[in-house]
Image: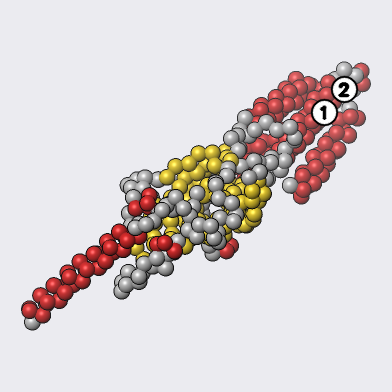
Amino acid sequence: MWILKVLIVIIFIVSCASAQQNVTKIIDSLTENYDKRLRPNYGKMPVNVGVSAYILGIHSFSEENMDFTMDFYFRQYWNDPRLQFKKQPGIEYITPGYEFGRTLWFPDTFFVNEKESFLHTITTKNEFVKIYHNGDVVKSVRLSVTFSCPMNFVRYPMDTQLCAIPIESYAHRSNEITYYWKDGNDSVGIVPDIDLPLIKVKNLDLKSQVISLAHGTYSRMELTVAFERTVGYYIIQIYIPCTMIVIIAWISFFLNKNAMNIRCVLCIAGLLSLIVECQAINTFIPKTSYSKALDLYTGICMTLVFIALVEFAFISNTESFKNSTKAPCADKIFRFLFPIFFIVFNIFYWIYY
């Protein structure tokens, strides 16, 4: 019985050694007469390069710099007939080390709106190349890339920013390399619950196109990430305080002439608070030539508080106010119109935005 066990072990060791030798021979044979300077099918049909990605994280989203940083797996698929090898039992594909990849041709794919990027190298370079017996090649890398993203803040902070990531070949035209999404609309995956504190990923949109540039036509793919801002923070930090200041200004219409100093302080303090609030808000987003949704709200609040201050200044200098113990007619009118206008404004504001 023990002789049988020994024979089985010996056969297993021999078969493993034989398989290892076969893989080594395959790898050595792949680079014989292989010129990585030339693309597959050079001078003939274009190379069809499939692309897929899996988003691991969104590390930053900067309104001031108009960019965002994304960590993701980026995979490319193509066929190189020069890398075909005879299929053997147990060897459908090989995965040589990344050093071997330096001897192969790769698509010169780049991200058009990349600002800066790096390839992860801990604990080793986060990349691999997989070669199938029919010449299919898969290259996968893990990247962290900062992409530029032109933003529009007209609806801020109820805005949704559409950030496109164009992908194309740097040197090869569309008659040399053609890009396509490997699995259609399912080519890009994303980790669940990837949202930032104030930004969440609403959806991903994929498309392919051919663009015309000065030096010819190029195949381009585009991944558009829709970032939606969560408005809860702004309601608590901005909208509610602004509303409270307007309510305080409205309360000032109910104070009699014996509380003139208090009334004056309420209006001036409210106006100054709104000015400081607006300045604090605008330090976190780029200066724009147009008004934002938040500017409209704070502007209306500031106008109402200013009107309350002007109205107080006007009636406090009239003889009827000085000689009468009753509330001025202007105060009675503003007690009624002030809240109605603010409520109607809020209804239209929140419906529109």
* Secondary structure found at label 1: helix
Where is 313 relative to 202, above or below?
Answer: above
- Quarter holding the N terminus is bottom left
Q: Residue beneath label 1, please?
A: 307
Depth check, front residue: 106 or 55: 106
Q: Distance between the residues labelled 2 and 1?
A: 12 Å
Give the left or right position of residue 265, taking residue 102 as reference: right
Tell me which residue sits at (15%, 76%) in the image.
8
Depth check, front residue: 118 or 301: 118
Amino acid at circle 2: Ile
Amino acid at circle 1: Ile
Image location of residue 124, percent across then percent down? 33, 47
Image location of residue 132, percent across then percent down? 39, 65
Residue 262 in which image quadrant: top right
Q: Which residue lies furthest to the bottom in this view?
A: 1
Depth check, front residue: 324 or 260: 260
Q: Does residue 54 appear in this view?
A: no
Tell me which residue sits at (58%, 43%) in the image.
113
Tell me which residue sits at (86%, 30%) in the image.
331
Question: Which numbered disc flags the more N-terminal residue, 2 or 1?
Answer: 1
Q: Does residue 93 appear in this view?
A: yes
Give the left or right position of residue 113, taking residue 350 as reference: left
Q: Residue beneath label 2, please?
A: 315
Residue 20 in which image quadrant: bottom left
Image location of residue 175, percent across then percent down? 59, 56
Depth check, front residue: 314 or 69: 69
Where is 321 relative to 12, above or below?
Answer: above
* Secondary structure found at label 2: helix
For disc 1, the neighbor class at 10 Å (few under 14, some 14 to 19, many from 20) is some
Image location of residue 299, percent across then percent down? 76, 33
Q: Residue 183 carries which label?
A: none
Residue 241 in which image quadrant: top right
